[in-house]
Image (cartoon, rainbow, N blue to C red):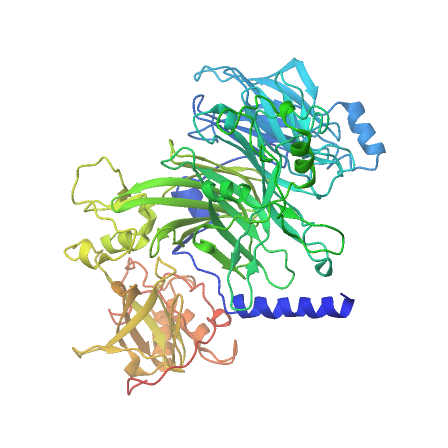
């Protein structure tokens, strides 16, 4: 296929993406909270070290009540309940001669020639295993942490430092994935200085080290390792497998598409000890399959092929946990991220399917149709599937087949056949994920916390849709946990303490899993939030306890319908009438912003002296915005009572009652002169709200008369010589004519006076 054909194919893909996802719009959260709001009212706590960056590694230790953090030249031990107090830090820099050697090799001594801690594991009751880049000299050490909760220990064991090659990357920009099982470390990492020898490596322990076949693109082709998990198959420990999740360049891809990146899941048997005559000190049970996350379309699927992170969530069946994974696209055409969910049964089924096979360089990849040797490659030596006691007993044809056929033909598809949650064109991409299983009044729900590359965390719940296994993700909250918007690089969750720990290049943040009080002060608001952590207790929106016997706790996560649950609730806050002033011919902005971003505003108007209310239409003079109602070209008959109501999922809730008074320009001027002429009048200042009127209505700034919204100030010490219904103005409004909201689409005129 020539360049012209390849270009045509790429153009076709662009058109396909536009057809499938072009109309997609990013989902808005119901609640969006800024960094300052979270810090002031919702328990956000932060931690950072002076002149230190890159908090890449988090380890939650529930028994000790500590959060261990790996960063540049440091390991920190933080309190799980409050990371801002009782923090201990351990300096672990690279030796000076290693830093100088790193600098001589052309690396930046200030940003690369440091010891970036990439790996932290609990090794035993008293020590951690830590590994870092060591200024391009990977190194590992054991850190004493003790086991007493009241006196945390953090001390480097200088007698037990080891070579970190094959455990930690050389380059701080590279990721490493590992799991410690017993005393053995299974890691996926680049094992050389140039970052070209990628390997899945077993080290430590008493058995000999094993690795993948080096420099064989059929095994690993420039992989980026994401996560590693030990997942038992059954009660027999001989059948235990280690699963590696990574992305790599696809050897099976069409050459016309160039280097195509795909996501993979790889498996090895824990009791693999290598071959006897072939694959000596190499894995004999290594297999890999493609991990697909795509949106089905009429003309083909749209793939999210860049695996970013994965979380293993335990289920009722301990052998079949759920795998929640976040993906992004490798396309330069559009920006998108997705969450896909996988069952371990589907992963195992792919490894029991046909092997991928290719006869020669000009042939296509097909399912292998020949004879598969016994025992089947990929099976662990155990009594479950045969009489082989060791991989060294495997016949030569089994070893040779495993060497030449590491790739499976069938892919692993997500549950439901499509992503659980999708964001396209949202201005950010997903980077990390953590999950929690929550028991609610109407069922069990998985709550997902998704980190992004702009320092935010999305809270998403998985809600059943139709029959099992179909579900959909609902975006509840968007939380700005890092003030500098740095990308989320690591996340850990403590279900026991109901806390989420988030790391970035700039620091570590801690945030509670729920903010029930933020959902509102009414039963309907609490119910519409659909947060499985929260329920209405008759007075407030509070933490839901499944063991509680209080029958009046109200919660509807599945549907979020307050009509039945809150029909008799009388807890709505009393709306006080607020006065708003405008000037004839100018503009006024009636502020009313709903707590929920998924609600829309409904405005009604009641003219002074009348009983009936009418709907305020969207016209060129009355423009609805997200934050309120903008009225232009004010007339005297626009004066009256305006009621703002938030409508969400068919449920209405009054938000504000605003009484608009429209003054003439002459009246405003007369009032200003009256105040200036009053005996003992105070000097010009904030109290002279009439002067503010004149400054706002004079032609010039912006080309038209305008006044946004004047809030009434407290009653003055000495009553002014002005009508009693016109209070003094507290201060100049912060909104200006130049900051007017954008004009909305004009709707039909449904009221005569508009």
The C terminus: image quadrant: bottom left
Which residue is pictured at 34% across the width and 67% down the height?
Answer: 600
Q: Nearer the viewer, residue 305 or 502?
A: 305
149 is higher (above) or lower (below) than 286: above
Which residue is pictured at 30% across the width and 77% down the height?
Answer: 616
Residue positioned most to the top: 159
Give residue 595's quadrant in the image: bottom left
303 left or right of 649?
right
Q: Nearer the viewer, residue 346 or 328?
A: 346
Which residue is pictured at 67% across the width and 52% down the height?
Answer: 252
Residue positioned most to the left: 568
593 left or right of 8?
left
Residue positioned most to the right: 104
Give residue 363's quadrant in the image: bottom right
Q: Is residue 79 something that shows in the picture?
A: yes
The N terminus: image quadrant: bottom right
419 is higher (above) or lower (below) than 94: below
**Exactly how many numbered labels are in the figure?**
0
353 is higher (above) or lower (below) than 57: below
Instruction: Please state the horizontal and vertical placement of residue 9, each as a whole percent of the image.
Output: 68, 67
257 left or right of 644?
right
634 is higher (above) or lower (below) than 590: below
């Amino acid at each position: 296929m020539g360049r012209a054909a390849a270009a045509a194919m790429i153009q076709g893909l662009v058109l396909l993406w536009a057809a499938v996802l072009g109309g997609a719009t990013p989902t808005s959260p119901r609640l969006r909270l800024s960094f300052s709001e979270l810090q002031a009212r919702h328990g956000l706590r932060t931690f950072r070290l002076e002149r230190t960056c890159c908090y890449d590694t988090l380890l939650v230790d529930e028994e000790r009540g500590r959060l261990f953090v790996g960063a540049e030249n440091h390991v920190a031990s933080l309190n799980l309940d409050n990371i801002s107090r009782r923090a201990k830090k351990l300096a672990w820099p690279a030796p000076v001669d290693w830093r100088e050697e790193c600098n001589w090799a052309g690396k930046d001594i200030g940003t690369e020639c440091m010891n970036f801690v990439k790996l932290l594991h609990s090794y035993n009751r008293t020590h951690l295993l830590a590994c870092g880049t060591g200024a391009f000299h990977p190194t590992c050490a054991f850190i004493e942490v003790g086991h007493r909760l009241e006196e945390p220990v953090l001390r480097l064991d200088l007698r037990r430092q080891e070579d970190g090659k094959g455990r930690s990357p050389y380059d701080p920009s590279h990721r490493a994935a590992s799991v410690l099982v017993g005393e053995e470390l299974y890691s996926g990492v680049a094992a050389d200085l140039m970052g070209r020898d990628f390997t899945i490596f077993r080290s430590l322990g008493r058995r000999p080290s094993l690795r993948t076949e080096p420099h064989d693109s059929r095994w690993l082709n420039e992989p980026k390792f994401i996560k590693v998990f030990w997942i038992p198959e059954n009660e027999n420990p001989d059948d235990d497998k280690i699963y590696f999740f990574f992305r790599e360049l696809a050897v099976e891809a069409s050459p016309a598409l160039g280097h195509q990146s795909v996501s993979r899941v790889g498996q090895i048997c824990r009791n693999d000890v290598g071959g006897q005559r072939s694959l000596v000190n190499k894995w004999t049970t290594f297999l890999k399959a493609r991990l697909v996350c795509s949106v089905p379309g009429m003309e083909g699927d749209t793939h999210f092929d860049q695996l970013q992170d994965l979380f293993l969530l335990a289920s009722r069946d301990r052998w079949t946990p759920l795998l929640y994974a976040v993906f992004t696209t490798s396309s330069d055409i559009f920006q998108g991220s997705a969450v896909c969910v996988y069952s371990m049964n589907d992963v195992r089924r792919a490894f029991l399917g046909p092997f991928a096979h290719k006869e020669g360089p000009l042939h296509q990849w097909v399912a292998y149709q020949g004879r598969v040797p016994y025992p089947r490659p990929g099976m662990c030596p155990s009594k479950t599937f045969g009489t082989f006691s060791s991989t060294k007993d495997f016949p030569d044809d089994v070893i040779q087949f495993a060497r030449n056929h590491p790739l499976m033909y069938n892919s692993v598809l997500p549950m439901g056949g499509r992503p659980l949650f999708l964001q396209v064109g949202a201005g950010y991409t997903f980077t990390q994920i953590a999950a929690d299983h929550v028991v609610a009044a109407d069922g069990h729900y998985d709550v997902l916390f998704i980190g992004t590359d702009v320092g935010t965390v999305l809270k998403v719940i998985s809600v059943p849709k139709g029959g099992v296994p179909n579900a959909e993700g609902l975006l509840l909250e968007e939380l700005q946990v890092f003030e500098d918007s740095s990308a989320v690089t690591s996340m850990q969750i403590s279900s026991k303490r109901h806390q989420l720990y988030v790391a970035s290049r700039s620091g570590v943040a801690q945030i509670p899993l729920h903010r029930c009080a933020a959902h509102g002060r009414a039963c309907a608001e609490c119910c519409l939030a659909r947060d499985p952590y929260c329920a209405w207790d008759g007075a407030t929106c509070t933490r839901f306890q499944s063991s509680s016997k209080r029958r009046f706790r109200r919660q509807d996560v599945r549907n979020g319908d307050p009509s039945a649950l809150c029909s008799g609730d009388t807890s709505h806050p009393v709306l006080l009438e607020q006065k708003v002033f405008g000037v004839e011919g100018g503009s006024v902005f009636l502020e009313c912003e709903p707590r929920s971003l998924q609600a829309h505003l409904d405005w009604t108007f009641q003219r002074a002296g009348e009983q009936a209310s009418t709907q305020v239409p969207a016209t060129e003079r009355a423009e609805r915005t997200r934050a309120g109602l903008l009225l232009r070209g004010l007339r005297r008959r626009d004066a009256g009572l305006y009621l703002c109501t938030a409508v969400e999922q068919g449920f209405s809730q009054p938000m504000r009652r605003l009484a608009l008074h429209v003054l003439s320009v002459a009246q405003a001027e007369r009032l200003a002169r009256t105040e200036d002429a009053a005996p003992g009048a105070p000097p010009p200042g904030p109290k002279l709200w009439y002067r503010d009127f004149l400054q706002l209505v004079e032609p010039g700034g912006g080309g038209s008369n305008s006044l946004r919204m004047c809030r009434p100030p407290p009653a003055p010490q000495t009553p002014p010589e002005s009508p009693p219904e016109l209070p003094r103005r507290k201060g100049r409004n912060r909104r200006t004519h130049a900051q007017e909201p954008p004009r909305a689409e004009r709707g039909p005129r449904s009221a005569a006076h508009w």
